[in-house]
Image (spheres, rainbow, N blue to C red):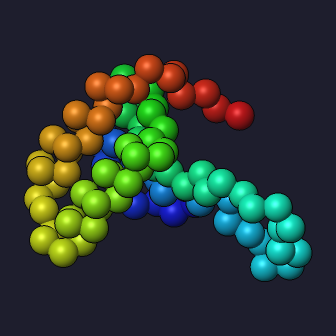
Amino acid sequence: MQMLYDSESFVVVQIHANAPEESAPKPTVPQLARNGFEIVDKRSGKEVYLDGSWAEMFQQRVTAWQQNTPTQEEIEDTLEGYAELAHTPIALH
């Protein structure tokens, strides 16, 4: 898990769900990669998990941000669009 962004309104975390531990033996059966991104809208208290093609599209956006250094307003506007997909309330464990 890697924190990519944290502001007053949003948190974005990249999750490597099937990342093998260094000491773990190599799996004999192929595993489907389940990497993705979790976007938390702090204002609404909800989160959305992007995987599959949604995660690929978001990764392209992150890569573009790394190359072009957007303003915080541009990042927040983009995250606002993804936050509209958020329906899962945040639960503390």
Q: Is residue 43 above or below residue 11?
A: above
Q: Is residue 80 above or below residue 12?
A: above
Quarter of the picture holding the C terminus? top right
Tell me the residue at 47%/46% (across/down): 52
* Viewer-closest of 83 and 17: 17
Tell me the residue at 77%/72% (across/down): 21
19 relative to 70 in the view: left or right: right
Question: Quadrant of the rendered structure where residue 28 is?
Answer: bottom right
Residue at the bottom extreme of this rendering: 22
Q: Is residue 22 above or below residue 76?
A: below
Residue 37 visible in the snapshot: yes
1 relative to 82 in the view: left or right: right
Number of on-image labels: 0
Q: Is residue 80 above or below residue 66?
A: above
Question: Where does residue 7 sit, x and y in percent of width and height?
Answer: 31, 49
Question: Quadrant of the rendered structure where residue 8 is?
Answer: top left
59 relative to 16 in the view: left or right: left
Question: Where does residue 78 sit, x and y in percent of width and height?
Answer: 20, 43
Question: Quadrant of the rendered structure where residue 22 is?
Answer: bottom right
Tell me the residue at 28%/60% (across/down): 60
Question: Where does residue 84 sit, x and y in percent of width and height?
Answer: 29, 25
Tell me the residue at 16%/54% (across/down): 72
Residue 43 visible in the snapshot: no
* Viewer-closest of 35 and 32: 32
Question: Where does residue 92 sit, x and y in percent of width and height?
Answer: 64, 32
75 relative to 15 in the view: left or right: left
